[in-house]
Image: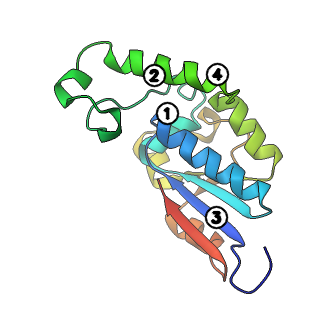
Amino acid sequence: MNGNNSIKKMMIILSKATLENVYAAFVLANGARMEGIEAELFFTFFGLEAIHNEKLEHLHVATVGNPAMHIPTLLGGLPGMEAIATKMMKSEMEKIDMPDVREFLEILKASGVKLWACKLAMDMFHYKKEDMYPEVDGVLTVGGFYERGAGEGVHMLFI
């Protein structure tokens, strides 16, 4: 990737910790690193659950209001539907050797991805840095995240 128009850094904002959103963000960050592009993840609002030590291993697939599920909202809201969909997705991910969330965080950190927790969301949910995955790089304000995204060749992506 040479030239003045090349992507130098991906700044990915994760606002929802549904299994499908978390994996989308992680795969995109990992893909960036594999292409030699810097990557940073900013976890805000419910996206914080993807780096919360007690919650990151219990993420679910969204079955209500998710048009990709191809099931009526009424069925998606039935007791047990979310658990069934989550189990099915995890089973399919295991078949292709997709790492679980904690292992994927380890892979991202090892490849140089920066992980940031949103200060506003941390305050709103009364979380402390100690509640988070230990390799989180820090807690940033939105302004601090934007500062890190300054410069040419930086792309921001909201998931």
Do the numbered discs 1 and 2 sit on residues whose CB atoms are within 8 Å?
A: yes
User: Does 81 appear above or below 110?
Assistant: above
- Residue placed under numbered mark 2 in the picture: 86
Which residue appears at 20% of the width and 30% of the height? 73
Do the numbered discs 4 and 3 sit on residues whose CB atoms are within 8 Å?
A: no
Question: Is disc 4 placed on a helix, strand or loop?
Answer: helix
Q: Position of residue 36 (x, y in %)?
A: 80, 63
| C-alpha span from label 2 to label 4 | 12 Å
- Residue placed under numbered mark 4 in the picture: 94
User: Does 134 appear above or below 159?
Assistant: above
Question: Is disc 2 placed on a helix, strand or loop?
Answer: helix
Assign the N terminus to one quadrant of the image. Answer: bottom right
Between circles 2 and 3, the one closer to the viewer is 2
- Residue placed under numbered mark 1 in the picture: 19
Left or right side of 34 for 66: left
| C-alpha span from label 4 to label 3 | 27 Å
User: Does 23 appear above or below 74?
Assistant: below
Q: Position of residue 2 (x, y in %)?
A: 80, 79
| C-alpha span from label 2 to label 3 | 28 Å
Between circles 4 and 3, the one closer to the viewer is 4
Label 4 neighbour load within 10 Å: few <14, some 14-19, many 20+: few
- Residue placed under numbered mark 3 in the picture: 10
Whether residue 20 is visible: yes
Between circles 2 and 4, the one closer to the viewer is 4
Q: Earlier in the sequence, mark 4 or mark 3?
A: 3
In the image as oriented, which residue stretches furthest toward the top?
80
Q: Position of residue 58 (x, y in %)?
A: 51, 22
* Type of amino acid at the residue the image marks with label 3: Met
| C-alpha span from label 3 to label 1 | 21 Å
